[in-house]
Amino acid sequence: MTVTRRLARPRNDRWIAGVCSGLARRFGVSPNIMRLIFVISCLLPGPQFLIYLILWVMLPNE
């Protein structure tokens, strides 16, 4: 039996909004690794910051 983690923003492990921490918990990686991936991806062209804002609004709190 596998346990799936619900995608939500944690209340206690936030830096800005908790989006990276919530994604890290969901996919089973370190929150710092997810934050590093996000910062590096912001150096590339694309809508990363807009996606972050959308996830901030759409993801529920724990």
Image: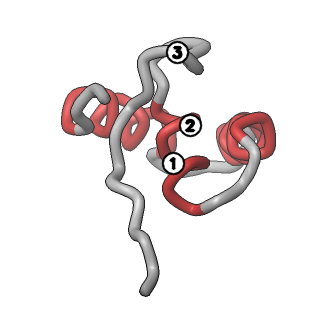
Q: Position of residue 52 (x, y in %)?
A: 42, 35
Q: Residue furthest bottom?
A: 1
Measured from the top left, where is residue 20 in percent x and y? 56, 37
From the viewer's perspective, tell me whether residue 40 is left or right of residue 41: right
Task: For marks 2 and 1, give the CA distance.
Answer: 5 Å
Vertical position of residue 13 compared to residue 38: above or below: above
- Pick the quarter of the image with the C terminus: top left
**Is 21 above or below relative to 29?**
above
> Which residue is at a point 45% across and 46% down the rendered structure image?
47
Q: How far apart are the alpha carbons under marks 3 and 2?
A: 13 Å
- The three-letter code of the residue at mark 1 reads Leu
Q: Which mark is residue 23?
A: 1
The disc, 3 or 2, on the residue closer to the chain's N-terminal end is 3
- Of the numbered discs 3 and 1, the one sitting upstream in the chain is 3
Q: Callout 3: few (<14), some (14-19), or many (20+) C-alpha neighbours within 10 Å?
A: few
Mark 3 = which residue? 12
Secondary structure of residue under mark 1? helix
The answer to whether residue 57 is above or below residue 30 is above
Residue at 52% across / 15% down in the picture?
12
Disc 3 vs disc 1: which is toward the camera? 3
Disc 2 target residue:
20
Q: Secondary structure beneath disc 2?
A: helix
Q: Amino acid at mark 3?
A: Asn
Quadrant containing the N terminus in the rendered view: bottom left
Q: Is residue 60 left or right of residue 27?
A: left
Q: Quadrant of residue 34?
A: top right
Give the label on residue 2, or none. Answer: none
